[in-house]
Image (tube, coloured by chain):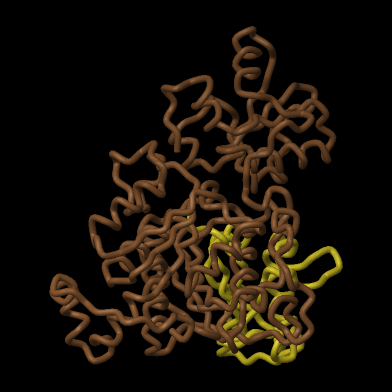
Amino acid sequence: MASIAEQPATLSNDEIRRYSRHLIMPEVGMEGQLKLKQARVLCVGAGGLGSPLALYLAAAGVGTLGIVDFDVVDFSNLQRQIIHSTADVGRKKLDSAAESIAGINPHVAIRKFETRLTSDNALEIFREFDLIVDGTDNFATRYLVNDACVLTGKPNVYGSIFRFEGQASVFATENGPCYRCLYPEPPPPGLVPSCAEGGVLGILPGLVGVIQATEAIKLILGSGEPLIGRLLLVDALAMRFRELKLRKNPDCPVCGTNRTITTLIDYEQFCGVRGAEQPATGKLGDMTPEELKQRLDRGDDIFVLDVRDPHEYQICNLGGHLIPLKDLPQRVGELDATREIVVHCKLGGRSAKAVDFLKQNGFTNVHNLVGGINAWADRVDPKMPKY
Amino acid sequence: MKIMIPTPLRQYAAGQSAVEVPGSTVGEAVQALLGSHPELRKHLYNDQGKLRAFVNLYLNEDDIRYLQQEKTPVAAGDTLSIIPSIAGGRG
């Protein structure tokens, strides 16, 4: 890539053996392999997308891999985050990822950034890399990654997933569109479910992450046709790949002709407080799992309403009355407005919406179980399965 | 014509991934869709009746913002895709 400082680099005999299948291909060859070796790629997130893409970039011989992550490996990650192993549960994702990468290719220099990417640190971190791969999971960080890429002039290799559907593109190249050209604004908080609430097919981040790795390698090599100005749509269930044309929006606030965004902004505010889909806490009308347990044990007359979907009820339940959130308007007649009602879902997001809906419909004594059934499993009933 | 419904919105369209609708423009086709699946409306349009900024409509491969928006004429064999932003990936 043009931004890489020209420095003499060579491959050792070990490296030549390792990369022989690249070296014998004219599209890569020695010249391409040295470009890979000198390339510095930043993976934002070491989760679903970050796992396969970091593994493949490391195996391919990208010389410097940066990883930004602040999370800890959880059992529920292992269904798709293949850079982490069962033995890594409880460890920092950064440490676990670095170990896997080093195991695959000891020639890779790993830069660990144990932090949440923020408006205060993004530009500084991005400057040390040639291209950025976005493997984040919330709108606030996606807009932050995009804007920081535009402001620092680094390509943004984008991938995003939901259930069994994915999107991939290359944003923020010199003449190509950016993420804001495609979506000027994020959805209001709560309207689009996160993977924790909506689920994701385990192989999907593999498919999309490897597409991102492919694009990163093509950008480094300067060959092929990168996904610039194209949005690739992946539907794993139908196994259909489609492609849409993207245009650079001349009115884009960050990369258009009359730019209004020239520095990083407050992305949490831009995306709403709950842009990261954190469970709501401390609101009036909330009830903690401990409080609910205490009241139920005491024999208080409490009606537990479960607004999850039936397949979630099968995993675990509190014996509550099941009305999925989307059916609530039609089935509200099943509820008795004179009784005290506690609503729960998995994490507290859907139940908060159900509480709002019930309050608008004349229910006065309704509470939201904070943190959902997962918080109940954490704090009241450790034997309950957590999903 | 056919309207493709993305995963996050299928729950508001009786679980369908594609819906056949009549109409001679993009706007008419979308109104026909909302006629049979009214719950979709608030996910596609804001309170002022404008298409939401995180939802794009593509006629075949092209963003209707760069055609004639909702007045863009459509033919029977066309496909209209609703493409909302999705954010998952790290978690």
Q: Is residue A101 left or right of residue A174?
A: left
Name of the residue lying farthest toward the top: A298
| Colour of chain B in the image | yellow
- Residue A65 sits in which quadrant? bottom left
Residue A71 appears anywhere in the view: yes
Against A89, residue A318 (above or below) is: above
Depth check, front residue: A290 or A133: A133
Residue A14 in the image, given as x and y percentages of width and height: 14, 70
Residue A44 in the image, given as x and y percentages of width and height: 49, 60
Name of the residue lying farthest toward the front: A8
Q: Please tell me which residue is depicted at 72% across the width and 49% down the height of the picture.
A: A273
Q: Is residue B46 left or right of residue A195?
A: right
Q: Is residue A378 left or right of residue A365?
A: left
Depth check, front residue: A6 or B43: A6
Residue B63 in the image, given as x and y percentages of width and height: 64, 84
Residue A142 in the image, given as x and y percentages of width and height: 60, 63
| Colour of chain A in the image | brown
Q: Please tell me which residue is depicted at 83% across the width and 29% down the height of the picture.
A: A364
